[in-house]
Image: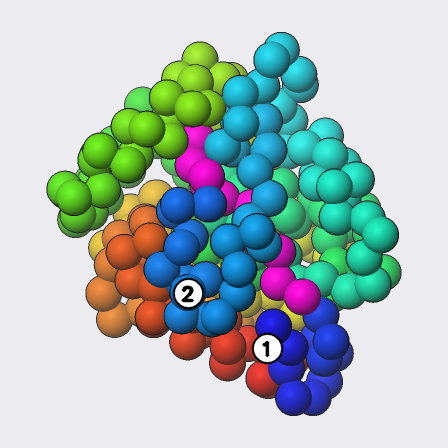
């Protein structure tokens, strides 16, 4: 996928899914973008079992970059806790990572404790589609609940706002209006270019693929 002009011209889109998720969670958006499912990069805790490795976002970012190389130019999209991984990748290698798309980024420091995270998750889950549940269960089973817990424990201590302060590339933040995990004021604090879709909760790459794809396409065309 390329833009017609500007800094992102010639860059490819690569995607890191959310915690415990794999390429299935992005298929509706990727289909709308005409981008292959192979553009999704699963990582330990994010679609793959961790097998005891350190799940800090910064170290996972190094693993992500190792899997991308050699690459001339990429725009990295992350969902949920995957946003922290791609943000660190942009900080580490700005020559390769030329843009970021953060969909429902975590973790708002006002909700860094486990109980506040749980409250926000429950407040959002009621707006998600029940038809997701069988696929969610399969994806979580593939990653492993224990590894998901370990990854979230590291992610909730990672300040994405501090990481993004050291990133110079264009940044787009996308969220659903019912996303309590990523409130609008938190999204806008991370980037001047923050889009709230007309519908959706936290899982918009899956549940509102066309709208998410439209926001990403506009980002490519304007940056």
Looking at the picture, how far across and down is residue 13, in whole percent?
Answer: 62, 63
Looking at the picture, how far across and down is residue 6, in whole percent?
Answer: 72, 85
Identify the residue at image location x=43%, y=24%.
142
Q: Which residue is mark 2?
A: 31
Q: Is residue 43 visible?
A: yes
The answer to whether 173 is drawn above or below residue 206 in the figure is below
Residue 25 counted in the magenta span: no
Q: Which range is magenta?
A: 12-22
Distance, label 1 to label 2, CA atoms, is 16 Å
Answer yes or no: do the residues labelled 1 and 2 have beta carbons within 8 Å?
no
Crowd class of label 1 (few under 14; some 14 to 19; many from 20; radius 10 Å) = many
Crowd class of label 2 (few under 14; some 14 to 19; many from 20; radius 10 Å) = some
Question: In this view of the protein, which residue sits in the foreground, 222 or 161?
Answer: 222
Tag 1 secondary structure: helix
In-image side of 75 versus 173 (left or right): right
Numbered disc total: 2
- Precedes in sequence: disc 1 or disc 2: 2
Question: In this view of the protein, which residue sits in the foreground, 150 or 15?
Answer: 15
Tag 2 secondary structure: helix
Q: In the orientation shown, which residue stands out farthest toward the bottom?
A: 4
Question: In this view of the protein, which residue sits in the foreground, 56 or 77?
Answer: 77
Identify the residue at image location x=51%, y=33%.
46
* Figure quadrant of the N terminus: bottom right
Identify the residue at image location x=21%, y=35%.
133
Q: Which is in the foreground here, disc 1 or disc 2?
A: 2
Image quadrant where residue 223 sits: bottom right
- The numbered dot on residue 220 is 1
């Amino acid at each position: 996928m390329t833009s017609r002009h500007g800094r992102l011209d010639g860059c490819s889109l690569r995607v890191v899914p959310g915690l415990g998720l794999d390429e299935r969670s992005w298929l509706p958006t990727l289909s709308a973008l005409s981008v292959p499912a192979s553009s999704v990069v699963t990582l330990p805790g994010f679609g793959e079992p961790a097998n005891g490795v350190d799940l800090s976002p910064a170290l996972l970012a190094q693993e992500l970059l190792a899997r991308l190389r050699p690459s001339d130019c990429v725009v990295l999209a992350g969902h949920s806790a995957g946003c922290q991984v791609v943000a660190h990748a942009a900080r580490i290698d700005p020559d390769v990572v030329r843009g970021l798309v953060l969909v429902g980024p975590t973790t708002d420091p006002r909700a860094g404790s486990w109980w506040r995270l749980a409250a926000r998750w429950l407040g959002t889950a009621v707006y998600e589609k029940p038809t997701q549940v069988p696929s969610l269960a399969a994806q979580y089973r593939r990653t492993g609940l224990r590894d998901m817990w370990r990854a979230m424990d590291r992610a909730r201590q990672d300040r994405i706002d501090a990481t993004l302060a050291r990133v110079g590339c264009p940044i787009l933040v996308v969220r659903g209006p019912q996303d309590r995990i990523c409130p609008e004021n938190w999204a806008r604090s991370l980037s001047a270019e923050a889009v709230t879709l007309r519908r959706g909760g936290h899982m918009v790459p899956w549940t509102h693929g066309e709208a998410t794809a439209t926001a990403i396409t506009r980002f490519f065309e304007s940056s």
